[in-house]
Amino acid sequence: MTFIDYYKILGLSKNATKEDIKKAYRKLARKYHPDVNPGDAEAEKKFKEINEANEVLSNPENRAKYDTYGKDWKHAEEFEKAKQQQQQYQRASQQTGYGGYSDEDFSEFFSSMFGGGARRGRGGNVQFRGQDFNAELDLSLEDVYRSHKRTLTVNGKNIRLTIPAGVRNGQVIKIKKHGGEGISGGPRGDLNIKFSIINRTKFKRDENNLYTTVDLDLYTALLGGEVVVDTFDGKVKLKVKPETQNGTQVKLKGKGFPVYKKEGHFGDLFVTYQIKMPTKLSEKEKKLYEELAKLR
């Protein structure tokens, strides 16, 4: 997993012209448009990245910020303002000690800007907490059914991460001190990882419960019997009661999805029966059904 390079996404170099950006965007947008790739999750993700890259690089002001600050370009003005304030403070300190500025003034300013991430170090320098990094990790539903380890590459560094079973789509976990370097000896920022869970299974997930539909032939529905059902970790055999109606739902306790950070705890699996009507009836079968109809 690496941070998005907008130039790389569009297949361009950093000296690309505005016209180069426009041409590259149009070409890739046509290729990965959802209408051209219906149901293709990877193409949809690529299309979003292409649009994001174009929005930044096609705007001269935003592009300049991106070229200077990379993925932190949105905070460019805050960084510039903070640097100016620190320079002013240092000049004033050299001339008059504190130059009319109090510790409280700076603490309030930096706390409001960086959420308490600034403090004064030795020699009067203001220390800045490093910028938090935000990244997104794509996983399949199968990936998060069991806890597993994964090595992530963030800004050229490998991070060994344990992903607990039961992680949910959109959930964010924080890895402390794996963000940007602090300024003037300040602490590192954190790395926030957002999970994007892609579900290509036959199961629908809702919290810790799973839902699925199973076809049931008419004869088994009427007379009862057995049916083999897929669960997330294997197959089970269920007994079907006689005269089971279409849409009947049964619950398989503990056969759902693992509960996040509660080892050995699982949700339930709900199975809905969908009765399949027989087709291509023989003449004999038709006559038998006619006889049944008369009996009813």
Image (cartoon, helix red, strand yellow):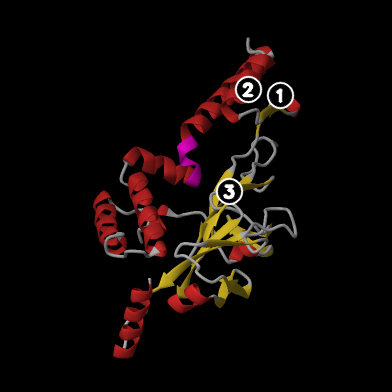
Q: Earlier in the sequence, mark 1 or mark 2?
A: 2
- SS assignment at label 2: helix
Q: Which of 119/234 is in front?
A: 234
| Residue at (50% x, 62% y) in the render | 248
- Name the amino acid type tagged 1: Gly
Q: Quadrant of residue 106?
A: top right
Identify the residue position indicated by label 3 in the image.
Answer: 171
Q: Quadrant of the C terminus?
A: bottom left
Q: Is residue 94 above or below residue 62?
A: above
| Residue at (44% x, 65% y) in the render | 246
> Distance between the Cα atoms at labels 1 and 2?
8 Å
Residue 50 showing in the rendered view: yes
Identify the residue position indicated by label 2 in the image.
Answer: 90
Identify the residue position indicated by label 1 in the image.
Answer: 124
- SS assignment at label 3: loop
Q: Is residue 247 above or below residue 67?
A: below
Q: Which of 281/41 is in front?
A: 281
Question: In the image, which residues are magenta?
Answer: 71-75
- Name the amino acid type tagged 3: Gln
